[in-house]
Amino acid sequence: MAEDQQTPATDAAASDSEATALAEAGKTSQWLSKNGFDHEVVPSDHLGVEILEVAPQFLLPLCTALYANGFNYLQCQGAYDEGPGQKLVSFYHLIKLQSNADRPDEVRLRVRLDRTEPKLPSVYWIWKGADWQERECYDMYGIVYEGHPNLKRILMPEDWVGWPLRKDYISPDFYELQDAY
């Protein structure tokens, strides 16, 4: 009887893996596969936007191909922490802006990174709008965007220790406040 019972966490993990296995490749995913770009299809979001998971080493070639295919606008780039001891994720929301497009093509890329050494190539040289967004992700999560021209803290003081939005971050007991003068 105990063998038949599963915890909610294992049920959720099983349904996530089943959903990933059953996710249908969208138009962008099919184009990437046809052209030899390695990625994993993840179920679309609630708005129907395709989500693709990409390995860090394939991010730059895949983004270059998407840009060449018309995805000329980086709407959003950000990061999140899946939990203590789990992966960090860098994500990208790309849009293909065209004239007379009522509903432009959209795709989201997701790159899962090891938290001990989170590194991936910068997309700044493809979409200049990634500049401050990558700096913010570096500042808050410690993700290193290799090739970024000015990767330094943007929100926290330069001498800040740690990555404040990581779920395993421990707040210091003492903050030194500097005079505004």
Image (cartoon, rainbow, N blue to C red):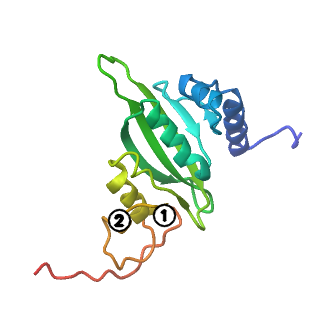
The picture places residue 48, in percent across and down from the top left corner, at 49, 24
Residue at label 1? 144
Q: Residue at x 46, y 52 (%)?
A: 79
Q: Is residue 165 visible?
A: no
Lateral position of residue 23 relative to residue 67, left or right:
right
| Vertical relation: 158 (above or below) 118 | below
| Three-letter amino acid code of the residue under disc 2 | Asn
| Three-letter amino acid code of the residue under disc 1 | Val
The picture places residue 181, in percent across and down from the top left corner, at 10, 81
Residue 139 sits in quarter: bottom left
Q: Nearer the viewer, residue 167 or 48?
A: 48
Q: CA distance from mark 1 to mark 2?
A: 11 Å
Q: Residue at x 37, y 76 (%)?
A: 160
Q: Residue at x 32, y 80 (%)?
A: 175
Residue at label 2? 150
| Mark 1, secondary structure of its residue | strand
Q: Residue at x 37, y 35 (%)?
A: 72
